[in-house]
Amino acid sequence: MSAKAAGRDRPTLTERARRAQFIQVTIDLVARHGYAGTSLAKIAEAAGVSKAAVLYHFPTKNAVVQAAYAEVIEALTDHVGTELSARSGAAALETYVRSLVSYMTAHHGHARMIIAAITEDSGVGDGTTSASRWQNVGLLIDAAKGAGDYRPEIDSRATAVIANGAVDAIVAQWLEDPGFDAAAAAEALVEMLDRSLRV
């Protein structure tokens, strides 16, 4: 039974702290063992509590995985958003690429968590082809076209899909081989986009 189901609308400070602990443990476990290798029992064991204690906050494995995914996405979005806040035109897309790659390589557990959540049956609702993945990047491209930095005939959706796919490939290669220079690859991608999109 969840805290809310027990008759309280808002969890206590202790309950919020416990929930945050379960979310962090889940991020760590999914990063190391994948979605399939993570269970409520393993989450409980890693947190040093009973499985019933986890079930008090999260009714299913998918519920805690979805909460962990949301936490990771929020942190990533906040980071990229902060980096983009002072950028416009073509500089915004370039900053998007650099900041996304730098965040993912600095937080490899988050990167693995995101990949596992969107590629396995976790119920997060996002996927590698979700419209939300290209729409926000498409808006950056549209803004750069409006600013006169990019050619007006550029297909924003196609370019956004290509840019995201390239970032995914860079991060995947780095996760497979930590010796791979992801930052240099991000710069190469920025240069390729610049050459193909600029007026």
Image: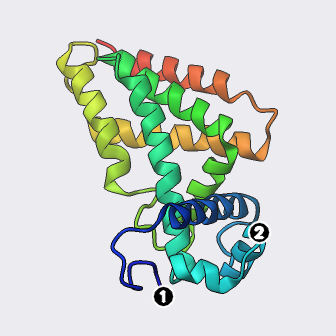
Q: Check disc 1 and give the amino acid type.
A: Met
Q: Is residue 121 visible?
A: yes
Q: Is residue 118 visible?
A: no
| Disc nearest the viewer among 2 and 1 | 1
Q: Check disc 2 and give the amino acid type.
A: Ala
Q: Residue at x 29, y 17 (%)?
A: 89
SS state under label 1: loop
Quadrant of the image containing the C terminus: top left
* Disc nearer the start of the sequence (2/1): 1
Answer with left or right where residue 10 lies relative to residue 60.
left
Q: Residues within 10 Å of mark 1 (few under 14, many from 20)?
A: few
Q: Residue at x 63, y 86 (%)?
A: 52
What's the distance in space between the residues labelled 2 and 1, CA to CA? 21 Å
**Numbered circles on residues, count:** 2
* Whether residue 5 is situated above or below residue 73 in the rendered picture: below
Answer with left or right where residue 179 lies relative to residue 155.
right
Q: Which mark is residue 77?
A: none
Residue 29 x/y as whole percent: 72, 64
Q: What residue sits right under mark 1 in the picture? A: 1
Q: What residue sits right under mark 2 in the picture? A: 46
SS state under label 2: helix
Answer with left or right where residue 107 lies relative to residue 119.
right
* Whether residue 139 is situated above or below residue 91 in the rendered picture: below
Q: Residue at x 37, y 68 (%)?
A: 10
Q: In terms of image quadrants, where is residue 64?
A: bottom right
Q: Nearer the viewer, residue 121 or 156?
A: 121
Q: Residue at x 68, y 75 (%)?
A: 36
* Whether residue 199 is situated above or below residue 5 in the rendered picture: above
Q: Nearer the viewer, residue 99 or 28?
A: 28
Residue 92 x/y as whole percent: 36, 22
Residue 186 x/y as whole percent: 58, 26
Q: Nearer the viewer, residue 12 or 138?
A: 12
